[in-house]
């Protein structure tokens, strides 16, 4: 099934109607790039040549491309030794043609980074005032991002650049329409927004069973997806997997990681972290009020699926092998699952406000995040769950993943904590509660779980 991606489809179609001849589409493996491109081109009136590059030799890629070309265009077109000659032929046909080179990063690996990019630069430059267009698509984010650097031969050759991302919590809910809000949020917190993972969810069984069967079992479909597909490009990066396991479900500062992975100050940790940030695996965050303070910065795993895997599966691989997935789930994973889900629900709340902001519903907003305070007068330190920073101050939301409705007493206690910080004055105080509230209020903004999933 195909869900959402309306803006992405429009970007592809707009490119086909433009004066441009090169487009770049990139995103993590199995995020749905190929499906998206095919969907956008399904009513294209011209000819389409869709070729998936391989890590085989340049000559082999040429021949395989010719085979695809013969299927798409019909007939036999002879033998060619280079993509340059093939594209000259395509141009000479004087008919609208879109060429999709999928997994272009594989061609770069087999032919050489500079050689492949220089070749494509000359090809795209040669397409001006012709009816041929090229879409380059790739999964290695760091490799594809190199194409956007000013030193790369392909710099400036793309009329349209499109990053295909995992679904957010709201988009992911389309796969889980039969589940109530609480289970929907919990499932996203564990399996994230990867379409390939979401398609594996069986909504006829419980979330517990899905976690056991899909993620903990060594042959579980989602575990195989993570270990054999999504993490493929990190196999040669030394302790990167251990770094991700260390970050897990927490927030880790550079100094905490350095003490474990780079005590001799070799600089390797910085390179590994940079690699992970550039590949969209981790993010470097800071409170909205401490952006410039490096001591407040911390690293966290970006995608919920990776986060759960490195929190609950990766550290327990040997236990799963010895005791079985069910025993590990019941003895280790399940007892801490509610705590895990409560932290992830805070992120869902942030994604909700981000949706509002992108749709222009939060006029004057400049940032969304957490807020760390240090009230020296009362000798208290703490963090507000979600803070919306506006030009003229902050709105504060405390987020609750309670079993049952939030009551007024708890709301008043939380509000008093916020008001007691003398150095901080909130414009507005609100609450997000997964199961809703047992009271109404004109003083506080109340957002229940169902409101998060309403169409805006």
Image (cartoon, rainbow, N blue to C red):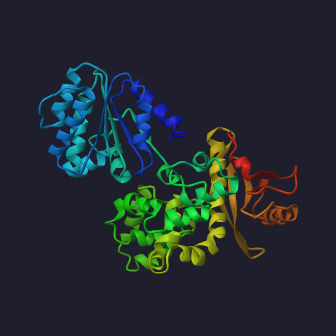
Q: Position of residue 198 (x, y in %)?
A: 53, 52
Residue 298: tell me if it is visible: no
How many numbered marks are there?
0
User: Which residue shows up at 51% across the image and 60% down it?
Assistant: 305
Residue at 20% across / 21% down in the picture? 92
Q: Which of 394 and 359 is in front in this view?
A: 359
Identified at 83% across, 65% down, the residue is 410
Residue 362 locus on image (x, y percent): 69, 42
Position of 218 relative to 93 (above/below): below
Task: Please name whichever residue, 211 or 95, is drawn nearer the observer in this view of the structure.
Answer: 211
Left or right placement of residue 209 versus residue 447 in this view? left
Q: Which residue lies furthest to the top in this view?
A: 94
As drawn, 217 above or below 98: below
Give the image location of residue 126, x and y in percent: 23, 28
Locate residue 189 relative to residue 456 in the image: left or right.
Answer: left
> Residue 164 at x, y = what percent?
46, 44
């Amino acid at each position: 099934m195909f869900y959402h991606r309306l803006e992405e489809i429009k970007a592809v179609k707009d490119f086909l109607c433009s004066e441009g001849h090169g487009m770049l589409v990139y995103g993590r493996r199995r995020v749905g790039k190929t499906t998206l491109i095919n969907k956008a081109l399904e009513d294209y009136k011209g000819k389409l040549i869709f070729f998936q590059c391989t890590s085989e030799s340049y000559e082999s890629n040429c021949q395989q491309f010719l085979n695809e070309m013969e299927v798409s265009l019909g007939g036999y077109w002879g033998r060619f030794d280079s993509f340059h000659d093939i594209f000259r032929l395509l141009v000479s046909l004087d008919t609208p043609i879109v060429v999709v080179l999928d997994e272009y990063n594989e061609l770069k690996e087999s032919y050489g980074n500079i050689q492949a990019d220089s070749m494509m630069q000359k090809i795209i430059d040669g397409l001006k005032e012709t009816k041929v267009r090229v879409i380059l698509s790739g999964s290695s984010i760091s490799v594809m991002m190199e194409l956007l650097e000013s030193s790369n031969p392909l710099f400036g050759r793309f009329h349209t650049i499109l990053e295909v991302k995992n679904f957010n919590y709201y988009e992911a809910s389309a796969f889980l329409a039969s589940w109530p809000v609480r289970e929907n949020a919990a499932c996203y917190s564990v399996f994230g927004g990867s379409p390939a993972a979401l398609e594996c969810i069986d909504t006829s069984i419980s979330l517990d069973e899905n976690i056991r069967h899909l993620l903990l079992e060594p042959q579980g479909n989602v575990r195989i997806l993570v270990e054999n597909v999504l993490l493929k490009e990190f196999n040669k990066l030394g302790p990167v997997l251990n770094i991700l396991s260390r970050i897990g479900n927490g927030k880790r500062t550079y100094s905490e990681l350095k003490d474990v992975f780079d005590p001799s100050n070799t600089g390797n940790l910085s390179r590994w972290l940079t690699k992970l940030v550039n590949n969209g695996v981790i993010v470097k965050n800071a409170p909205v009020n401490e952006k410039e303070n490096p001591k407040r910065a911390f690293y966290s795993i970006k995608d919920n699926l990776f986060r759960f895997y490195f929190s609950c599966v990766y550290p327990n691989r040997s236990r799963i092998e010895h005791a079985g997935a069910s025993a590990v789930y019941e003895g280790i994973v399940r007892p801490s699952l509610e705590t895990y889900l409560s932290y992830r629900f805070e992120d869902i709340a942030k994604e909700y406000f981000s949706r509002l902001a992108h749709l222009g519903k939060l006029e004057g907003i400049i940032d969304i995040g957490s807020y760390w305070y240090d009230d020296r007068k009362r000798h208290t330190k703490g963090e507000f769950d979600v803070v919306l920073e506006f030009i003229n101050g902050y709105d504060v939301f405390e987020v609750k993943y309670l079993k049952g409705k939030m009551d007024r007493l708890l709301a008043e206690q939380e509000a008093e904590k916020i008001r007691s910080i003398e150095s901080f004055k909130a414009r507005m105080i609100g609450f997000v509660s997964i199961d809703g509230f047992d009271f109404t209020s004109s003083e506080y903004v109340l957002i229940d779980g169902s409101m998060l999933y309403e169409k805006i």
